[in-house]
Image: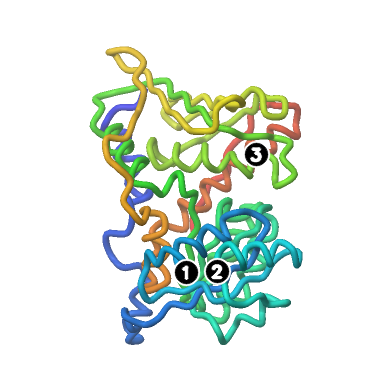
Amino acid sequence: MKTRRSFIKAMGSGVALSAMSFSPVEAALRNKGNNLEKEIKIGIIGAENSHSYNIGQIINVQKKFPGVKVVAIWGETADFAKIAKEKGHIPLIVKDPADMIGMINAVIIDHRHPKYHIKAATPFVKAGIPTFVDKPFCYRLKEGEEFLKMAREVGTPVSSFSTIAQSDSTFDVARQVKALPEYNNITRFGPADISSPYGGIFFYGVHLIQPLLNIFGYDIKEVKINAEGKKGGAALIFEDGTRANLIFSTLHYGWETFVETKQGIQRLESQVHETDPQRCYKDMMELFRTGKEPRSFNNILKCVAVLEALERSVNNGQKWEKVEDVTI
């Protein structure tokens, strides 16, 4: 059973909700005299989904962030790039992502399948361009560890998160859970599909897993899939024995979380309204402008470790799988 004390311990090195002090890369940028008022010119790599032109809408059309522009996009196909350019009011389509180097000072990696993310992000990080990688961060834990070690060595700020997890609502629910004297079983509903062509459980599973980690802590040790396609779910066990059950919703698009307390089954609902612009986009722009990383590298990778363990459970006949430890 989770007690308030064990929750605080689990969160101690966690989200930190998030960086109350400057990260090494942020400090490096500030020491270099990074101009907080400089114009941010963003390039987007990947146009297969709506994220690319939605970001263009927020920045170029609605102008939620003065001094920030999306200036270029590369698409997996000419049609994807054209749609994103038109809907996001993005001035330029490039034929090669490398063509953006020299014209941008921030980049968003936005492929649908996470297996493409690290390769796409690497040249920009090596060039010193602050980089945001859309969810899921990567497809393999080892690859992600090597990439983030490289980012730390060269001093380029990097982050990645689910917009569902990096929200005022999720942080408020985490605050509420922290105040509970004790709780036990956790149930979280949300869409997922172990047979998705975009990485199976990785694709939408990240929206189930990352908020769960933000709210309840990062010490998940063992997981098991119990699903067929979009039906079913998964079980996860924390170090202290608390069990979380994921239910893959099929008739409703949304995410809900419940916990068992001594007073009964409690639905966890945010008591705050989302800011405008949303926290996720503000944190992304802060990353680009100052180098402040809203999540620790360990937290980014722990989500990948849990998703990878769930994938192994899919592949081994839906047996229990250990979640690899993460230390970077």
Which of pointers 1 and 3 lies earlier in the amino acid sequence?
1
- Decide if residue 96 is on the left or right side of residue 258: right
- The answer to whether residue 317 is left or right of residue 107 is right
Element under label 2?
loop
The residue sitting at 66% across, 52% down in the picture is: 139
Residue assigned mark 2: 89
Q: Quadrant of the N terminus?
A: top left
What amino acid type should be assigned to the residue bearing mark 1? Asn
Whole-percent x, y for residue 125 in the image: 55, 74
Q: Are marks 1 and 2 in contact (CB under 8 Å)?
A: yes
For disc 1, the marked residue is: 60
**Residue type for callout 3:** Ile
Give the percent coordinates (x, y) of residue 128: 51, 80
Does residue 62 lie above or below 114 as drawn?
below
Q: Quadrant of residue 72?
A: bottom right
> Which numbered disc flags the more N-terminal residue, 1 or 2?
1
- Residues 101 and 149: in front is 101
